[in-house]
Amino acid sequence: KDYKGAMNIVDSIDWRRVKNVRTLCVVGEIYAANGRYEDSKEIFLLAYHKASIGKNILYRLIEISLRMDDINEAEEFFEEYKQVASNDSTQYILQYKIARAKNSSLNEQIRILEEYKVQRNGHMNWQPCITKQEKNRNVWIYAMKSFSGSVKANML
């Protein structure tokens, strides 16, 4: 977990010559942990092109793109992820993260979490997160009613 010390080693190697996908992923994590998201993305892209199945690498590329505030790129990687892992319920987590980054409506975020909950058959308890978003929506509605007397339907 000495990411700073690892940076000295990581920066001295030509990673294009490395064939081991797992090693490339570790290096990508080191760069990400040090806030060097562009370098992290480059390494994960190298790993993705060398991997036979890149579902986990795509997941990380989406997260890194979101950290870099590049929502369009995250959505492009997400489309690839859905093709590679069409039956994986984890796609709802990514969809939720993208929706949050886009400042989508609370209703949209709740809808995604509800779909995830249905797909997972209750294996993970997302109810606290759903409840929190519903409370946020209700507080927002109350505030809007207090200030304007009504809520416009298209704002929800």
Image (cartoon, helix red, strand yellow):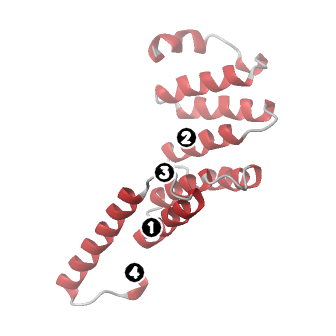
Could you say whether the residue bearing mark 2 is in a helix, strand or loop? helix
Residue that mark 3 sits on: 124
Extreme-left residue of the structure:
146
Q: Are marks 1 and 4 in contact (CB under 8 Å)?
A: no
Q: Is residue 141 above or below residue 42?
A: below
Among the two numbered marks 4 and 3 on one chain, the one whose residue lies closer to the N terminus: 3
As shown in the figure, which amino acid type bears the numbered disc 4? Met
Among the two numbered marks 1 and 4 on one chain, the one whose residue lies closer to the N terminus: 1
Q: Is residue 21 above or below residue 152?
A: above
Among the two numbered marks 3 and 1 on one chain, the one whose residue lies closer to the N terminus: 1
Residue that mark 1 sits on: 110
| Residue 26 x, y percent position in the rendering | 61, 22
Describe residue 95's horizontal placement relative to residue 100 as left or right.
right
Residue displayed at 59% across by 15% down: 11
Q: Work out how far the residue at label 2 is from the one at label 4, CA to CA, in angstroms.
A: 30 Å
As shown in the figure, which amino acid type bears the numbered disc 1? Ile
Q: Are marks 2 and 4 in contact (CB under 8 Å)?
A: no
Q: Nearer the viewer, residue 104 or 42?
A: 104
Could you say whether the residue bearing mark 3 is in a helix, strand or loop? loop
Residue that mark 4 sits on: 155
Which quadrant of the structure image shows residue 42?
top right
Residue displayed at 73% across by 30% down: 46
What numbered label is drawn on residue 64? 2
Q: Work out how far the residue at label 1 is from the one at label 2, CA to CA, in angstroms.
A: 23 Å
| Residue 124 x, y percent position in the rendering | 48, 51
Task: Check the picture and name the quadrant holding the C terminus.
Answer: bottom left
Q: Is residue 126 above or below residue 33?
A: below
Among the two numbered marks 1 and 2 on one chain, the one whose residue lies closer to the N terminus: 2
Q: Work out how far the residue at label 4 is from the one at label 3, CA to CA, in angstroms.
A: 30 Å
